[in-house]
Amino acid sequence: MAQIVMLWFVVINIIGYVVMSEDKNKARKRRDRVPEKTLFLLAAMGGALGVLIAMYRKRHKTRHMSFRIGIPLLLLLNVLLYGYFLQ
């Protein structure tokens, strides 16, 4: 079980990072964007760390209060859930 949880952690955080980075690239090019709901869903599914890292490395959504508060809260929830499943 622990191996599956760790694999999920790695995969969903890579996906979260890539999707957040891609949204930043689309924003620069003024193309169709990734919905904010999708970014929050990825974070809620366990990818909050990847989304948060991309958020600050790419300087994307850092002015949005919903992201500045919501993503760290989801990260805390992720840590608690990963801790529970890895016991």
Image (cartoon, rainbow, N blue to C red):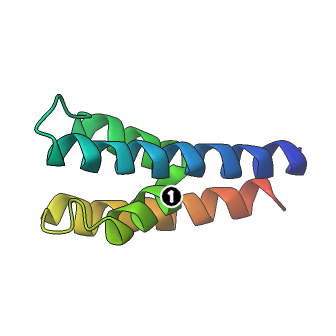
Q: Nearer the viewer, residue 29 or 6?
A: 29
Q: Residues within 10 Å of mark 1 (few under 14, many from 20)?
A: many
Q: Amino acid at mark 1?
A: Gly
**Residue 73 visible in the snapshot:** no
Q: Quadrant of the N terminus?
A: top right
Residue extending furthest toward the top:
32
Helix, strand or loop under label 1: helix
Q: Is residue 58 left or right of residue 62?
A: right
Give x and y (percent) for residue 8.
Answer: 71, 43
Q: Residue at x 20, y 59 (%)?
A: 61
Give x and y (percent) for residue 9.
Answer: 68, 51
Q: Nearer the viewer, residue 65 or 29?
A: 29
Q: Is residue 41 left or right of residue 2?
A: left
In the picture, residue 38 is in which quadrant? Answer: top left
Vertical placement of residue 66 versus 68, above or below: above
In the picture, residue 40 is in which quadrant? Answer: top left
Q: Residue at x 23, y 34 (%)?
A: 35
Give x and y (percent) for residue 23.
Answer: 28, 43
Pointer 1 residue: 50
Vertical placement of residue 24 versus 66, above or below: above
Q: Quadrant of the C terminus?
A: bottom right
Vertical placement of residue 20 versus 74, above or below: above
**Residue 85 visible in the snapshot:** yes
In the picture, residue 37 is in which quadrant? Answer: top left
Q: How many numbered markers are drawn?
A: 1
Give x and y (percent) for residue 34.
Answer: 26, 34
Q: Is residue 51 left or right of residue 65?
A: right
Q: Residue at x 29, y 60 (%)?
A: 70
Q: Residue at x 47, y 52 (%)?
A: 17
